Amino acid sequence: MNTKTGSVGIVAAQSAHFGAPLELRSGAVVPAYDLVFETYGTLNAAKSNAILVCHALSGHHHVAGLYADQPKSLGWWDNLVGPGRPLDTERFFIVGVNNLGGCHGSTGPSSPNPATGKPWGADFPMVTVDDWVQAQARLADHLGIDSWAAVIGGSLGGMQALQWTIDQPARIRHALVIAAASKLTAQNIAFNDVARQAILTDPDFHGGHFYEHSVVPRRGLRLARMLGHITYLSDDQMGEKFGRMLRGDDFGFGYGVEFEIESYLRAQGDKFAGFFDANTYLLMTKALDYFDPAHRYDGDLAAALASAQAKFLVVAFSTDWRFAPSRSREIVNALLKNDQDVSYAEITCNFGHDSFLLEEPQYHAVLSAYLGRIKL
Amino acid sequence: MNRRLDRPDFEVIAGWVQPGERVLDLGCGDGTLLKLLIETRGVRGYGVDIDDANVLAAIGNGVNVIQSNLDAGLAGFVDGAFDHVVLSRTLQTVHHTQEILAAMLRVGREAVVSFPNFGYWKNRAAVLGGRMPVSEDLPYQWYDTPNVRFFTMLDFEDLCAKMKILVRERQVLDEQGKQVNEEHNFLGSLAVYRITRG
């Protein structure tokens, strides 16, 4: 352990196989599946100190630490996990999992379809947040964890934490719902659809069966990521970081990369298109769009949350316009209506939706204060 | 704003809250009052505060706290959700005085309001001497005070009458936190009111 930096140090992924069929919300059945996951810290004898970290759109199980011999492989939420950090590995047993349908080792569209031997591709069934909770509950069984001390996630990850409290009320004691919403707005769905259209209309997509053509719908993925990335940042932050800065000395009067922001976005898009699976991206955005636990309760979120037994911490960020503080307040208000335990912190932070990934002092202090009070 | 030192008004407020009640503490500071009420009265409740340091401290104190601006009203709270809505030493910091009082009595059966009494003789003496008052209960300089409304007990009671709010009970304390039993608006440094809809 590298106690100097508070990092968990070198980590390794594990895998679990689930042989029992999983019936999905859509009615489709996944006959068997694997989930890759990582753990940090030690599960105590009472198995009462486990915290599940749920990932967002492009995340995965590698939450913290480094892989041996891969110095750039720092986990996506490393600043949160480790000795003395909010998710304190001296106290908690942290579990990160790659969701079903993902592209980082868990069964997903790029995995072989047992019926054909070829990659599932577009035939991989649509998975929803409910389905992920079900799959994660089986992982908890596999790890011998009856109830999570907490489930934490940002964005789509926060939605999973919220769904846990509804679907598995006895198995989650605290939900930390960060930069999330109880449902997407029309504007938010619209952004997702433009991203999907970019992928779906890429000639290299081949109806989702691009694997057998040995191509990747790189242009579509790249555009999807560029669009998404814009919405994860704030106008102010982009202005401060890039402004109207040019790469060269003057206008080139052409369509090449001229402004720094263009260069940045294209680099982000290229990087993403180089490793992320297009079908997974499509699935994840649909899971976001479909998420609406109040739907089955005539739109009454309080009714949907009425059976939850967990205590809640809801956190939003002032400049997050993709998952605005007002969306978090809807969750808070529903819990207030039910007289359920909830605290809400609205963090002043300039970095838009992506703030949840950053080490903002007030944000991390709030998480530490809340997690520090959890009884094990 | 709330100070974290001795808070004699907390004792008064705690005396008016019955065991097991539902309590909303507006401008809850670090959550000390709510924690006291939870521990001594077994209440259930929430605090509301806008300040980052207060929200952090309240979470650390293990009370439910909602970070929100009181001037934005109590939109997230449903009618009649609380037995008591507390606003301790905070009314003078709120711009929308009538709106917050009305909102408190919308979401709560009864409201408890404490505020520094501008009519306290030392405050009057300070102004007479040509200076804005600084005292135990008004511990700020004019240029750094969070207070935006300056009023006396008589002013507050006039507003209650205008808004058809009933004063159920009143406790007045001096700077040492001792009960004042006469000439309240002159000798009282801090006033604590129990009010309901008329």
Image (tube, helix red, strand yellow):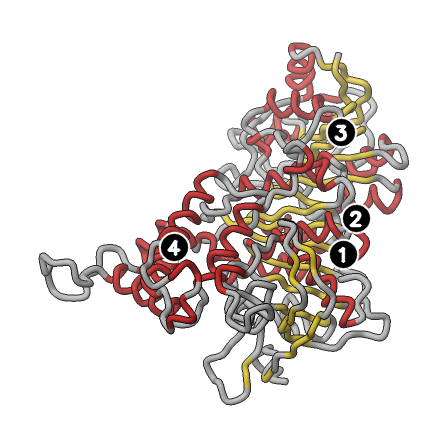
Task: Please name the amino acid that badge 2 sits on.
Answer: Gln
Kindly report the distance in space between the C-alpha atoms of the residues bearing marks 2 and 4.
41 Å
- Which of pointers 3 and 1 indicates the residue nearer the eye? 1
Residue at mark 2 shares a chain with residue at mark 4: yes
Labels 1 and 4 positioned on one and the same chain: yes
* Residue A118 coordinates in the image, percent (x, y): 51, 72
Considering the image in quadrants, where does the C terminus of chain A appear? bottom right
Q: How far apart are the two marked residues, 3 and 1, measured between alpha carbons?
A: 26 Å
The reply to whether dot 1 and dot 2 touch (C-beta < 8 Å) is yes
> With respect to residue A267, does A25 lie above or below?
above
Q: Residue furthest bottom?
A: A69
Provide the chain ID for the residue under circle 1.
A
Q: Which residue is mark 4?
A: A200
Which of the two discs, 2 and 4, sits closer to the camera?
4
Q: Which residue is mark 2?
A: A309
SS class, disc 3: loop
Residue holding disc 1: A172
Mark closer to the observer (3, 2): 2
Is there any visible trace of residue B6 in the rendered image?
no
Residue pointed to by mark 3: B81
